[in-house]
Amino acid sequence: MKRFILTSLIVFLTCGSLTLGTMLLAADGGGEATFHSLHCNICHKPDRRSAGPALSEIGKAYNGQQELLVQYLQGQAKPLIDLGKEQVMKGQLEKTKEISAAERGELAGYILSFGGK
Ligand code: HEC
């Protein structure tokens, strides 16, 4: 009986920490992780323009229109902010076309979260 309780306890604790780990990963924001792993952060800073427009600028331009931003990231919509540098993003869009639809959605959500709403 003691062994049974001990085993149950171990199983319970293992499952618990696994669940917690997954929750923490999710809370960490898949979109942010993708943004960094694709090196988008090199040209896009949260609040100031660098090589590319600031995330806040993009977030405001799209103003919560996640579907439109996803289309842009799929290479299926024209850019909203025209700095005359559309070509710079062309190569980048090859990367965002390759990720999964779920990842693209999260990435768009992450960018939109800078829109100040
Ligand atoms: C080499 C620098 C560079 C990198 C790296 C880069 N971008 Fe950009 N990005 C730009 C520039 C420049 C613009 C402005 C384009 C324009 O004027 O059409 C832009 C514009 C954008 C826009 C706004 C498009 C619009 O509707 O006007 C989004 C969204 C965006 N980038 C997302 C990303 C994502 C996601 C990544 C990573 C996969 C990324 N960028 C990587 C330079 C970069």
Image (spheres, helix red, strand yellow):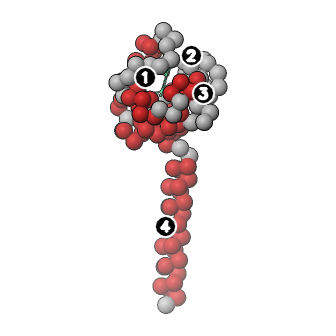
Q: Quadrant of the C terminus?
A: top right
Amino acid type at image mark 3: Ser
Note whether ligand 1 is within 8 Å of mark 1.
Answer: yes
Give the number of the disc on residue 26: none
* Label whose residue precedes the other's in the sequence (4 or 2): 4
* Residue identified by numbered label 3: 56
* Residue identified by numbered label 2: 51
Give the image location of residue 89, x and y in percent: 44, 18
Give the image location of residue 45, x and y in percent: 60, 25
Q: Label 3 to label 2, Cα distance in Å?
A: 14 Å
Q: Residue furthest bottom?
A: 1
Q: Nearer the viewer, mark 1 or mark 3?
A: 3
Amino acid type at image mark 2: Ala
Q: Secondary structure at mark 2?
A: loop
Give the image location of residue 86, x and y in percent: 44, 13
- Vertical placement of residue 8 versus 20, above or below: below
- Vertical placement of residue 18 versus 72, above or below: below
User: Would residue 80 be found to the left or right of residue 94 on screen?
Assistant: right
Note whether ligand 1 is within 8 Å of mark 2.
Answer: yes
Q: Nearer the viewer, mark 4 or mark 3?
A: 3
